[in-house]
Amino acid sequence: MKALPVIIVGAGGHAVVVADALLASGRSVIGFVDQDVQMHGSSLCGLPVLGGDEHLSQVSSAEVMLVNGIGSTGDTCIRMRVQQRLQDLGWQFSGVIHPSAIISNFAGLSPDVQVLARSVIQSNALIEAGCIVNTGAIVEHDVAIGSWSHVAPGAVICGGVRFGSFSHIGAGAVVMQGIQMGPRTLVGAGAVVVRHFEGHGTLVGVPARKVGN
Ligand SMILES: CC(C)(COP(=O)(O)OP(=O)(O)OC[C@H]1O[C@@H](n2cnc3c(N)ncnc32)[C@H](O)[C@@H]1OP(=O)(O)O)[C@@H](O)C(=O)NCCC(=O)NCCS
């Protein structure tokens, strides 16, 4: 069955990356919606910014799906709130899989997960709703990633790691094999996590240590 065309919610940097991945995978992309009126009528990747969310009232949710184009550099809640509000109105959100990504047949991904260019997801990895596995990230075997988390570009999550919802693993960070981290863990760019962490905090450096409150 042919996948439904999509509209991307948001028209910032992440939205453009997602649009590119969708087009590369042969999906039909109608355009973007964004609350910034200055963007309305402009185009990105050759696709129009159609208007704000109100534009969606002109479209049938039976014929079009949405894609979450809102990125996160730490707080992953905003993209969740926007998506859940639209889901409550009856919209379905599509996942995004760049054709250059390598995903094991034995990995389990929620349908709205976004897997971007040249990332790798190995066998028995489980990735819950709303997650982004960004450009060039590696998610090794038996990893479990809680909902609404973001594995930023180039991060390496070694085998058997588990981390909770709303986490952000920064660009180029490494989480060593078997590490367990609770929800709302923010790992800074370039950090190397070598110890378990109960969550709700920020880890930076090599080896990673908790900073702030
Ligand atoms: C860790 C992080 C969240 C801290 O952000 P912040 O709260 O705004 O912190 P600041 O930039 O004010 O820096 C606070 C201190 O931490 C240090 N610091 C910041 N990020 C750091 C990092 N990744 N590793 C080591 N130290 C870091 C700063 O040098 C500064 O030190 P100082 O107080 O001695 O001057 C952020 O720097 C980071 O790494 N974010 C992830 C970025 C990412 O993954 N982007 C991908 C987007 S797709």
Image (cartoon, rainbow, N blue to C red):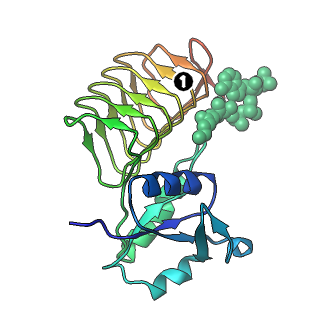
Q: Is mark 1 within 8 Å of ligand 1?
A: yes
Total marks shown come to: 1
In the picture shown, does residue 80 fall above or below 203?
below
Q: Quadrant of ligand 1?
A: top right
Along the line of sight, the residue nearer the viewer: 136 or 130: 136
Give the image quarter of residue 48: bottom right
Q: Residues within 10 Å of mark 1 (few under 14, many from 20)?
A: many
Q: Left or right of 139: which side holds 82?
A: right
Label 1 sits on residue:
173
Q: Residue at x 39, y 53 (%)?
A: 25
- The quarter of the rendered structure image containing the N terminus is bottom left
In the picture shown, does residue 184 fall above or below 112?
above
Q: Residue at x 47, y 86 (%)?
A: 57
Give the image quarter of residue 53: bottom right
- The quarter of the rendered structure image containing the C terminus is top right
Q: Left or right of 53: which side holds 130?
A: left
Q: Is residue 169 visible?
A: yes
